Amino acid sequence: MGGRGGAALTEAQEGLWYFQALDPANPILNTGQYLDLRGPVDDAALREAVARTVAESEALRLRFRPVAGGAVQVPGDAPELAWADLSGFPDPRAEAVRRMAEDSARPLDLSAEPAAAFALYRLGPDRHLLYERIHHLAIDGYGMVLVTNRIAEHYSALVNGTVAPAPFPPLSRADEADAAYRHSPRRAEDAAWWRAAMQGMPEATGPAPGRAVSGATFLREDRWLPGDLLGALADWSDTHRLNWTDVLTALTGAYLSRWTGGEVVAGLPFMARMGRPIARIPCMAMNVLPQRIRPDEDAALADWITPLATEMREARKHGLYRSEQLRRDLGLIGVARRLHGPLINVQPFDRPPGFAGLEVGLHILGAGAVDDLTLTFRGDPASGMLFEVDANPALYSPEDVAGHAARLPVFLAAALAEGRLAPVPTATPDEIAATEALTAAAVHPVPDTTLTALIEAQMQATPGAPALVFGDATLSYADLDRRSAALAGRLAELGAGPETIVAVALDRSLELSFALVAILRAGAAYLPLDPDHPPERLARILDRAAPVVLLTSPDLAGRFPDPGQSDDAPRRLLTTDWPQEGRAPDTPPQPGNMAYVIYTSGSTGEPKGVVIEHRAIVNRLLWMRDHYGFTPQDRILQKTPATFDVSVWEFFLPYIAGATLVMAPPGAHRDPTALAGEIRRHAITTAHFVPSMLSAFLAAPASQGIRMARVFCSGEELTAELRDRFHARVTAGLHNLYGPTEAAVDVSYWAAAPGDSSNPLPIGWPVWNTRLAVLDDRRRPVPPGLPGNLYLGGVQLARGYLGRDDLTAERFIIGPDGQRLYATGDLARLRHDGAVVYLGRSDHQVKIRGLRIELGEIEAAIMGCGLAREAVVLAREDRGDKRLVAYVVPQDGWSEQAAAAYLAARLPAYMVPQAWVTLDALPVTPNGKLDRKALPAPRFAQAGRAAETPAETLLARLYAEILALPEPPPAEADFFALGGDSLSAVRLSLRIEEETGRDPGLGAIFEHPVVAALARVIEGGVTTGGLSPLLLLAEGDPTQPPLFLIHPAGGLGWGYRRLALALAPARRVWAIQHPGLDPHHPLPESLSALAADYARRIAELVPEGPVHLAGWSVGGVIAQEMAAALSDMGREVGMVAALDSYPADVWRAEPDPDPVSALRALLAIAGHDPEAHADLDTREKVVGFLKAGDTALGALPERVLDGVVRVVTDTSGLVRRHHHRPHPGTLTHVRAGLGHGDRHLTAQLWRPYGEVDALEVPFLHPQMISPEAVVLIAPMLRAAMDRAQHRASPRSAAAE
Amino acid sequence: MITKDRMRADIAKILHMDAGDVQDDDNLPDLGLDSLRLMKLVLGWEEAGLKADFGLFAEHGTLGEWWQAIEAQQAG
């Protein structure tokens, strides 16, 4: 062992080291398991068995020491078997498991403690648990098997008095094997083979979208596979001369491919030991081989599994080539670009070892990182197999994990039984039954009647009650009866009756309501026409629908074909010719007759007339009346154009509930202020809004404080964000309804109540006698979580498209169980509770560069920044290249940079729009829906010269790679302006080092974020590492007074980057950083001296004109003193702003911070709340925590970190000893409104020293320069600077 | 009694190959011999009376090496 001092890591270990070094506090690489030993354990023998095993397994004694560019492994002391008697605990086993979990969750100090630990827990006289925990860097899964079996062999030998097994070969063999492969020509051949094999690989994803990076924990669900499944697997594999391991991998891949679009790139753990001298050495050797699996659903299983098995065998031949290297070879850098999705881990040798005289159970606690999903099979068909689903909790819920664990075994059994995949649904019979139960629960008796009969019954029942209000006119049910009967009689004379159509083209008016009721009373179906549609379209519809009469008004008549000139044109009956008296005809419709025909736009551009029968709309209206408890006291607003089927319930629900229909004035439906006025004036109880209109309504001042009983939303996706905004502003029930015109208005409902926290907000549950089916592309039921196509069934389905049997047959299909279904063309998924979530149109699925994108998520994020009134995001393909474009209707204070910065902080870079277009209003279709086609193409500004020098070209490529830009940016591009943040800056510095072999230092990127400038640094230029006292944060107009942002306690100004970008390019924004970050620089004597030094530096940089100052925390205290210092020098000071800073008087009584509290101040500087992390009480923990997070501080070199700690400690002391003097002008103070507890920290504390303008934002102190806070604070500072400049230049003030 | 040719024939059979195609210096994992199949082979040979450690087979990749190691063990 002596010769092994400081051995380099093997290639297999390097990838793990990199992972652990990036995230030292993550304990996920602690692999662990325990043996459940039942029977009389010989304590001494077991202790000796462990000692002997440890003695012959060098890996268990390793320490790992970081060195430049990686780590070395050196031997250390052997771990000893810990022993604890837990038999006194109420639940000894639970206590043991708790202790093991606690130990496994502890990040190891790999340089100081052994990579392995063993413990024996005594639960009782005949039961012990033997715990083994070994860091993955030291060992892999098979190594763990070797160690465990060896303990068992030694134990048995000791107990039985037999010969001990021959010791393991030396670990040096692993180094030799690694070196041999590294230098063999085979490595290059393998690289080439893999490159070819992965050519054109699809996006590697798992069942859940999102950031697949292992956290510190994982979710686990396990179960023993049933014996008949194992038997079927073994038999089928034998019959087809295949290894059962390959068959199991293939079928598991087939299950995953159902979730990933037909093909999955699975990761297959590979032992990499067979036939190699390391075969029996406990060490880390395993690799993960990416395997593309694209099953042929229609073929016999063997037809695709046999070639796949051959492919996998080929891949194993090249399996020594490290997957980490392959990922780099393929340019798959960044979280979103993965080499493989879920792991399929078949471990035939993971069986409990044999201990003489004991019964043994094996329990795996953790086997390494879980980025996505790991599906593990331990054991073999003959002796039993444990199936484990391990999942990344950031991507999967416990229900998801339980779902996969229950579903996969059923899928495997069904596939083997069928011999083909196509007939096997992804959903299990239980899941299908659960959905059917929901459909069954929606069954509800509804009278077999017609809308006409229901309305007539109501008119008889309450003749004197108010039925209809329009403007100042109120009509009773008797009036409605009289007017509609008279018109119905006339219509019958003109040929209207059951199965005929009468067209209506009227603006909102009393006549419109009379007309609709009259047509129904004549037994006919009404066809609403929008007079504003192009005449050509109207003529075409009239021609297709062939109504017997057109009801319109004299002023609209001119828009329709004149019957005097064309034989085909329908006869007109103008409002002025309508009779006032008369009898309704005795030609009542039957429930199966058509009630209305509404034309919708077809995807081909040809409008389609949807025919709805009475039975369907009666079901819909009676459901709504009963479900929401409508009464005669309700006043329902009619504001939806009649051509949009939402209007159907607005028009008729009041008349079957005895309520009052209130018609909004024509045009009012587009004017939020007018609508709010109508709602108040008429005491409306119920109104409908399309979500985009609701958003505009809520944004109008007039909507504040509106009260109603219910608001219904449909027609577009109702977002959680809008729901929350609604309840913050309006007092009313909010209900999300969903349904296409083809299924009688709505088929599902969801109560979006104030307590509802669903996100996304579901479309919910089926209405009466309705079925919602989510089926895959082969019309098989999908389980919860898996997106599919939404189909509708039940009584509300339309008869079809008028005169278009071909289109009807296309969309109204016969489902798998023989039921008639309508294919909505909408994508949906089921929640675990069975509620349906709408996911978008199947024909608008958005994928950009292979990444699945939910545009709604981006839209919600834009709305969340509070700078836009409305927002729509499209994936446009204007130049053959798909890009995300955001269209926004801006609010006051809109800034593209601020919005982009806000999004970059919330969404993956690839989801931040590449272009922004501001509009006065979003274009809408006549129905009030967003008109996507009318959105203009954006101009993608890629100003500036292209990158030229090799270094520029390299950087432009890396910027594009890391920020997922569609193309390399120009030489003038700023990394942060392009959406970079501190995390991506860390990645950039790593990539630059990989490509150039030289680490520019993270600070260089902060100091020189522009491609050309950073290129000069790489080419050998000078950088201060981002630590220079004056750091330009954002370029801007040099003629305007610049802003200086003074560092907080830590001395660094990097955190101001967002704030600076939000305030540029109107001016240049600089950071002032503490010179004492350089350990050779002396520390200042006092805060006044420090401020005077800063003032001198500013005066040198900006020889004349005013300057603005601002600072957060201590920075604000310094800024206040600097203002006085600059004033002393005769310099003009504009704005002086302090972000949650308080005078020294407040702190004077407090003790100076010790080094640990100075370190903890770093947490605040990095934007964390130190109070929330009380456990971080050492330098290692604080630094580890920062490294794990996406903060630049964590990536600081040690030297700089030392400087920061030094500066924090010193500056805190200076503040305590400082005495303020008056400042010139007004101090702009922005208080952190949250988290000051009982301390009365307010702007008033500054009063003794001058004027104060007190502002506040709802954030915690540590969050004050976060992107979220910047969105609010930047406009405040902008206004303060404007005011200050205004005051400072009396000439321009006088000119006004 | 286990002979080199018996082993060759068994390997060929489990890999669905002709015995003539399994040469002494062919890398057996490359031919498709995985740990599962190897386990089956070794169990069969043990039943037929071969006394050899499984590790011997796992650590070497060719029939030639196997046979050499078996001879060495038996000689020792």
Image (cartoon, coloured by chain):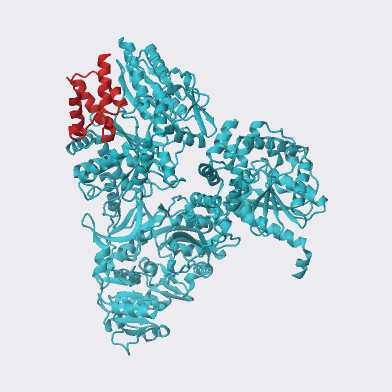
Asked if one can make out residue A392 in the rendered structure from this viewpoint, the answer is no
Q: Nearer the viewer, residue A1048 or A500?
A: A1048
The quarter of the rendered structure image containing the N terminus of chain A is top left
How many numbered marks does the figure carry?
Answer: 0
What colour has chain B? red
In this image, A225 relative to A1123: left or right? left
Vertical side of A779 occupied by A1187: above or below? above
Residue A36, image quadrant = top left
In this image, B51 relative to A1188: left or right? left
Where is residue A14 shown, x and y percent of the image?
46, 34
Asked if one can make out residue A860 in the rendered structure from this viewpoint, the answer is yes
Residue lying at 19% horizontally and 44% vertically, measured from the top left: A419
Q: Nearer the viewer, residue A174 or A1279?
A: A174
Q: Which of A1161 and A1042 is in front in this view?
A: A1042
Q: Which of A266 and A751 is in front in this view?
A: A266
Where is residue A1107 shown, x and y percent of the image?
74, 55
In this image, A1053 relative to A268: left or right? right
Residue A737, image quadrant = bottom left
Vertical side of A1100 occupied by A620: above or below? below
Image chain in cyan: A
Residue lying at 32% horizontally and 53% vertically, measured from the top left: A788
